Image: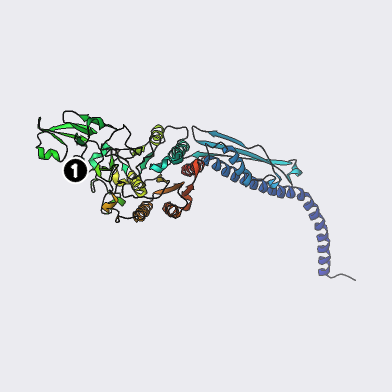
Amino acid sequence: MTKKPNEKRGASLRRLLRNDRGATAVMLAVLLVPLMAFVGISIDTARAYFLKARLNQAIDAAALAGGRVFFEADRDQDVQDFFTANFPDGFMGATLSPLSINADALEGSIEVTASATMDTTFLTLIGQSSVTVSARTVVQRAERGMELVLVMDNTGSMATNNRIGNMRSAAHELVQILYGTKTSIPDFYVSVVPYAATVNVGPHNDGWLETGAIDALPYEYPDSEVASGNCVGDNTSFDHGFDACTVGTKETRNGLTQEDCEAIGIWNEHTDSCLVSDGWKGCVMARPNGHDLTDATPASVPFQPFHWDRYVGGSSSWMHNRYLPNSVRERTTSSARGPNRACVTEVRPHLTLRGDVDEAIDDMVSHYWGYTHIPLGLVWGWRVLSPQWRGEWGSAELPLDYDEPLSDKVVVMLTDGVNTAHSNIFTAYGWLADGALGTTTSQATTALNQKLANICTAMKNEGIIIYAITFEVPNNDAGNVVRNLFETCATSPGHYFNSYGGGQLNTAFRTIANQLSNLRIRE
């Protein structure tokens, strides 16, 4: 039977397809090996990239951790611990080489390198049984600009258990971390503001005072008040020409009437001259009408000099706070005398050399008659930072603007006690009985606390970073108030530290310094 044309063509097509399937199978078999190798390379390469990415992440974290504790003895162990936490042993079956850590103290950099070897899965088909990846990072302590103010408690209680010594030691450690091995850092300024019941702005800043304020103070005492044998003490001398005990630098003024002289000095009727001495050490009173809480400049609201003008003697009678027997320093002991009693160490603004900063820290002492007025210390810390005060502290460029690029304004504030006011203690608010705090009772502490809270808010509103430290503050209700106040005053809860003992205080300052050390990954 003869096949039809269509049937012949179908049979031919089936024979052709059978022959092509065989050829295709051979072709696929030939291509399968390189295809599998290509897929294997892709898989092993992806695994290697993932391994390297994790290795990079781990050494970045480790190097940053090392940078934050650059000058700590256990720095390298911290680097290792952070690396292990991010790249645990046996990760992806990789074998690690020893971690390499190299630090350059002079440059302020730390370099971390690592490598990991991983067995391959498919690359063995082309003779490569393992692959090694490496990672390297360098963390540099960036020299970001900063104006840093240390507002430090110099009150009488700081003598207890050598708290003042512990504070100085902790502050020195902060300086060590921030400066490293350098003596100065560009655009880095440190100010030290000691405080007690007043703040000392320095006698050279007498231009900040109300005109004639110093002349009106009795820094000269006739011999009827202080005999020559009793005229002793710091910067004190007896002038035999005027039969007067003087405090400070004295000068003779001619051309004045006796009436004019009686308001400012001692009159010598034999020479028709007036003896005037300037015994002002530099401490100032708190400005009235709310300006004790502001950064208004002296040009707009001048200051009055601090002058402790009375002294409670052995009886209940009041007398001039003159220099009395025993050559004691007027600032540190219970027997202290003089118009500058409880006047603390002078503010040291905008220091750039590390040696000057260390010197300013060492100069701080505990003042026996120095009660605690924390808001005074903080507001003067603000005035050291406020751009409104540019040129007032001796530099035409400082303080910088609040929004100065790549620069921060930072305050570290410390106290060991609560705000206090006592009827027999003269402070920058005068005598408690004067009512300058809005009360003549124990409510003065509450008034001081509120002043501190207001100043904190005003400073933070300007972008100033505040670290607050309570050091051995009593564990009672009053202490709890101060702790809560300091925690609220701090920029965040992480900026507040409650410490007991020198070790905890050092840790607090060290933590602050490490937070202030600006780190960047250089490469």
Q: List x then y, in percent, for residue 198.
A: 32, 44
Residue in the image at 76% along x and 50% along y: 31
Residue ranking furthest to the top:
240
**In this picture, residue 436 sits left or right of residue 509:** left
Q: Residues within 10 Å of mark 1 (few under 14, many from 20)?
A: few
Q: List x then y, in percent, for residue 104.
A: 52, 33
Q: List x then y, in percent, for residue 305.
A: 25, 43
* Local secondary structure at mark 1: loop
**In this picture, residue 125 sits left or right of residue 278:** right
In the image, 114 versus 505, the foreground residue is 505
Residue type (three-letter) at the residue carrying disc 1:
Thr
Quarter location, residue 150: top left
Quadrant location, the N terminus: bottom right
Residue in the image at 50% along x and 39% along y: 140
- The residue pinned by badge 1 equals 211
Q: List x then y, in percent, for residue 208.
A: 24, 42
In the image, 198 versus 170, the foreground residue is 198
**In this picture, residue 115 sits left or right of residue 490:** right
Residue ranking furthest to the front:
315
Does residue 310 sit above or below 254 in this rendering? below
Quarter location, residue 79: top right
Does residue 207 sit above or below 241 in this rendering? below
**In this picture, residue 53 sits left or right of residue 236:** right
Colour setup of the view? rainbow
Q: How many marks?
A: 1
Quarter location, residue 444: bottom left
In the image, 137 versus 420, the foreground residue is 420
Q: Is residue 224 visible?
A: yes
Q: Is residue 305 visible?
A: no
Does residue 271 sit above or below 516 in this rendering? above
